[in-house]
């Protein structure tokens, strides 16, 4: 990932996205997460004075007005700059359209995903009365700022609320992070080999697939384009055709072809499921699994190896890196060992996860790695993680995830040379972080717990080598990894 995320950042609050949802660039606060997800949002007007309510989305036909002081509106949808919702007045339910500026301090504010490390207090409006407590490790949408107050959207039980945090809670508790959906595999260009015949790779031959001995030709390279929920569109490097479930008279035939892109992705969405070092590839619309033999077919899932495939990145490094943060609400509040949480203590685990993802695009579940660390006693209670985890984890998971541990160094020159094709984990004062690349005299720091003290970023930051020689990033050691795909 680059400094500003490339893809739409959907806050992970336990909701599961369906396949086929695309991702766009950075979004404004007007694109409210609950409404994107089809949920409702309770909001409180910024002003205590009168608000106008309208009958139409253009806000031209006035329905009436209502006092904002004790008003709460349940919003269910938006259209342009208008929000539709309902409220109670004199015991009756009133429905209508509102100007979003009555509820959003800055509708053009670029929404950011965040979480709170500690419990915080939300207020109805800046300087207003208390609304509710936000529990520790809860996820937030940061959607605006007014002076020293920050507008957030959060979830309590099954209800989304909009409230404001004061500067003290914001400074002490809130951590911004990359909320991109967790992907089983990074976007990129890959080769595909069947487990039943690892010497051969998929080859795009006209509008059909064949298996030929692996030669890394352009015809054997496929672009995996993320659609959501571990679903991908798979596009050939030659001819821009998509791996497609064949249809005839509106029904799927069970055959697989290469075809031009379709609107709605029908027959072209493939969901990946990891099985050791291989993947099952399920066609979402046909609900059948890709199977290799004399021809490529779609069949029901079974234990046969003909339905398992090795997917290997073509590039020597993953250009679509991202940072998986310790304090992500998906896992931040879970225990790491007995004495502390993932958010507080698992930098060693996440530095390994980020280094691997930056290396070859493979996502190693951090909870699996954390469990391994605890069971093998690499978790040092009260402190963090032993550096011995890196070599041990490579021996345990390297075969399935296509990487190996190749030792350590204290030399920046050796680190620079290694980063041409590999990645590393740096041990800096009291902390581990991944180093993903070296370009134009700078190193890519991937810090799973970015802080002002380290001057790092949850979206990655290019730093000079001098930063590793003194101060908060003075490195005592670099642990090195390379791809084995």
Image (cartoon, rainbow, N blue to C red):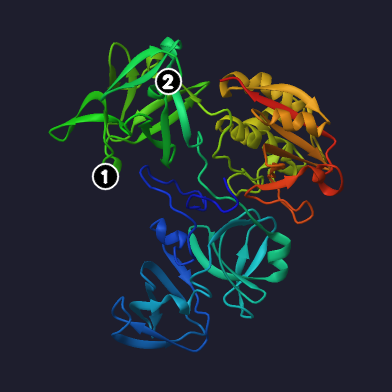
Q: Nearer the viewer, residue 96 or 71?
A: 96
Secondary structure beneath label 2:
loop
Q: Position of residue 250 (x, y in %)?
A: 16, 35
Residue 20 horizontal side relative to residue 123, left or right: left
Where residue 440 sits, quadrant-wise, is top right
- In the picture of the structure, the residue carrying the numbered disc 2 is 217
- Distance CA(mark 1)–CA(mark 2): 29 Å
Q: Which numbered tag is attached to residue 263?
A: 1
Image vertical order of residue 10 relative to residue 437, above or below: below
Please name which of the two marks, 1 or 2, marks the residue nearer to the observer: 2
Secondary structure beneath label 1:
helix
Mark yes or no: residue 386 visible: no
Q: Residues within 10 Å of mark 2 (few under 14, many from 20)?
A: few
Q: Residues within 10 Å of mark 1 (few under 14, many from 20)?
A: few
Q: Position of residue 342 (x, y in %)?
A: 69, 42
Mark yes or no: residue 48 visible: yes
Q: Nearer the viewer, residue 39 or 133?
A: 39
């Amino acid at each position: 990932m680059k400094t500003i995320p490339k893809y739409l950042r959907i806050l992970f609050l336990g909701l599961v996205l369906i396949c086929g949802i695309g991702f766009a660039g950075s979004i404004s606060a007007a694109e409210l997460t609950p409404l994107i997800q089809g949920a409702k949002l309770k909001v409180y007007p910024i002003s205590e004075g009168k608000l106008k309510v309208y009958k139409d989305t253009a806000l031209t036909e006035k329905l009436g007005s209502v006092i904002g002081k004790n008003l709460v509106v349940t919003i269910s949808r938006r259209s342009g700059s208008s929000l539709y919702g309902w409220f109670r007045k004199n015991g009756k339910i009133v429905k209508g359209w509102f100007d979003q500026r009555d509820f959003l301090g800055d509708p053009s504010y670029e929404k950011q995903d965040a979480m709170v490390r500690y419990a915080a207090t939300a207020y109805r409006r800046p300087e207003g009365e208390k609304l509710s407590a936000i529990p520790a490790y809860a996820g937030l949408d940061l959607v605006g700022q007014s002076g020293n107050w920050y507008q957030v959207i959060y979830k309590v039980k099954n209800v989304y609320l909009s409230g404001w945090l004061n500067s003290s809670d914001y400074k002490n508790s809130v951590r911004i992070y990359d909320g991109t959906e967790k992907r089983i595999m990074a976007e990129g260009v890959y080769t595909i080999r069947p487990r039943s015949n690892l010497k051969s790779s998929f080859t795009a031959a006209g509008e059909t697939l064949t298996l030929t001995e692996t030669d890394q030709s352009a015809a054997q390279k496929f672009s995996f384009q993320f659609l959501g929920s571990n679903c991908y569109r798979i596009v050939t490097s030659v001819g821009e055709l998509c791996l497609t479930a064949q249809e005839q008279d509106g029904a799927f035939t069970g055959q697989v072809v290469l075809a031009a892109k379709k609107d709605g992705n029908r027959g072209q969405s493939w969901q990946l499921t990891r099985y050791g070092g291989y993947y099952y590839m399920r066609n979402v619309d046909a609900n059948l699994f890709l199977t290799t033999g004399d021809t490529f077919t779609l069949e029901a899932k079974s234990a046969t190896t003909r339905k398992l495939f090795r997917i290997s990145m073509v590039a020597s490094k993953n250009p679509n890196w991202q940072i998986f943060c310790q304090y992500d609400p998906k896992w931040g509040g879970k225990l790491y060992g007995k004495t502390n949480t993932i958010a507080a203590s698992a930098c060693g685990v996440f530095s390994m996860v980020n280094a691997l993802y930056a290396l070859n695009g493979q996502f190693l579940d951090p909870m699996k790695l954390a469990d391994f660390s605890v069971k093998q006693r690499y978790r040092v209670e009260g402190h963090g993680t032993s550096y011995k985890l890196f070599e041990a984890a490579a021996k345990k998971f390297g075969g399935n995830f296509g990487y190996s541990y190749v030792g350590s160094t204290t030399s920046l020159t050796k680190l620079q040379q290694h980063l041409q094709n590999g990645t590393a984990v740096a041990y800096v004062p009291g902390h581990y972080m991944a180093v993903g690349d070296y370009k134009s005299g700078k190193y890519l720091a991937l810090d799973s717990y970015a802080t002002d003290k380290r001057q790092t970023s949850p979206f990655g930051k290019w730093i000079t080598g001098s930063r590793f020689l003194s101060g908060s990033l003075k490195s005592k050691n670099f642990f090195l990894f390379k791809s084995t795909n």
